[in-house]
Amino acid sequence: MAAAAGAARFEGRVALITGAASGMGRACALLFAREGASVFGLDINEKGLAETAALVSEAGGKFEGAVFDVSRQGECAAAVQRAVDAFGKLDVLLNVAGIAPLGHMKDVTEEQWNRVLGVNTSSVFFLSQAAMPHLLASQGNIVNVASNAGLMGQAYSVPYCASKGAVVNMTRAMAMEFMKSRVRINCVCPAGTKTAITANASLPEDVNPQLLGRFVGMRGMSDAEEIAEAIAFVASDAARSFHGSILSVDRGVTAG
C-alpha cells in the first residue's frame, strides 16, 4: 500500500477510526493506511470490519479491527486501550460512526431517540474523553464527523439533527477547553453521501418531497472517498492552523 512520493501524510502515526466497517469510515481506513498510518477500526459490524481489514491488507496496509458499541462509555475506554495496546500510541481519532433513521417526529420512540444520540453524540464524547491523555502525549488531533444536518434543519430527521448539532458545538467546546494544549479538535460536516446509510434509507409515509431536498444539493451526492479526503486534510499537518473549525463538505447545500 505504498503512497505516492510525498503523499504519506500519516507515516508512523496511529489512527483510531469508528464506523470502519463501511461507508466513510471504511474510506478513511483505506486512505489513512495508504498514507502510512496504522489503523485501528471500530464497528458493531464484525463482517464489515473483516472486509475492511482484507481490503487494507491486500494493499499492504496495517489495520486491526474490533467490535465495540461506541455508545457506551466503558466500551469506548476499552476500545481506546485496545488501539494503544495494538500499536503503542494514538495520534488521530476519527469519530465517524453514525446512524440516520428517517421518521415523523410523532413516531420517534424513547429507544430510537436514545440510540441515535448514543451512537452519533455520546460516542464522540466518550471516545474523545478516553483518547485525550494519549493525544496530549502525541500532540495529536481529533476529527469529528457531523453533518449539514447539524448546521440546518431537516424534516423527518429531528433526532439526527439534534445529535449532529450537538457534535458541532461539542467540537467547539472541546477546542476551547484544550486551547492551551497542542491537540487540535475539528469537525467535518458532509451532506448527502453515497454510503450504506443513504442506500438503505426508507422514507416514512406521507412525506412532503419538497422538504427532502435539503439532504442533497443541486450538485448531487458526494462519494465516501471525497469526504475521506477532506477528513484526511483536516487531520494532517497541512491543517495545523485548524482548531475548533467546522468544515462543510456539502456541494453547496448550506450555501443558501
Image (cartoon, rainbow, N blue to C red):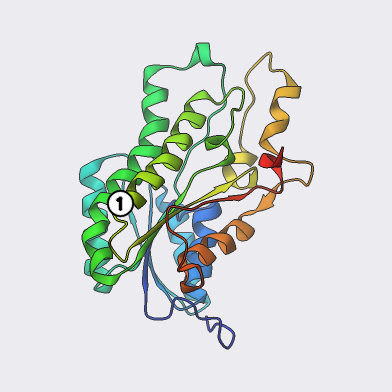
The secondary structure type at the circle numbered 1 is helix
Report whether residue 67 is seen: yes
Nearer the observer, 195 or 218: 218
Query: Left or right: where does residue 85 sit relative to residue 245?
Result: left
Give the amino acid type for the residue marked by disc 1 in the picture. Ser
- Bin the neighbour count of mark 1 within 10 Å (Cα to Cα): few under 14, some 14-19, many 20 and up: many
Q: Position of residue 147 (x, y in %)?
A: 55, 42
Query: Which quarter of the figure has residue 70?
Result: top left
Q: Position of residue 160 (x, y in %)?
A: 50, 31
- Judge whether 209 appears above or below 152 on screen: above
Q: Position of residue 43 (x, y in %)?
A: 39, 50
Q: Residue furthest right?
A: 218
Q: Position of residue 123 (x, y in %)?
A: 34, 43
Q: Residue furthest top?
A: 106
Q: Residue at 70% x, 42% y: name it.
A: 255
Query: Left or right: where does residue 131 sit relative to residue 161?
Result: left
**Total numbered labels:** 1
Nearer the observer, 217 or 177: 177
Residue wearing tag 1: 128
Q: Residue furthest front?
A: 180
Q: Residue at 76% x, 45% y: name it.
A: 220
Query: Which quarter of the figure has residue 181?
Result: bottom left
- Judge whether 92 appears above or below 67 on screen: below
Nearer the observer, 17 or 163: 163
Quadrant location of the C terminus in the rendered image? top right
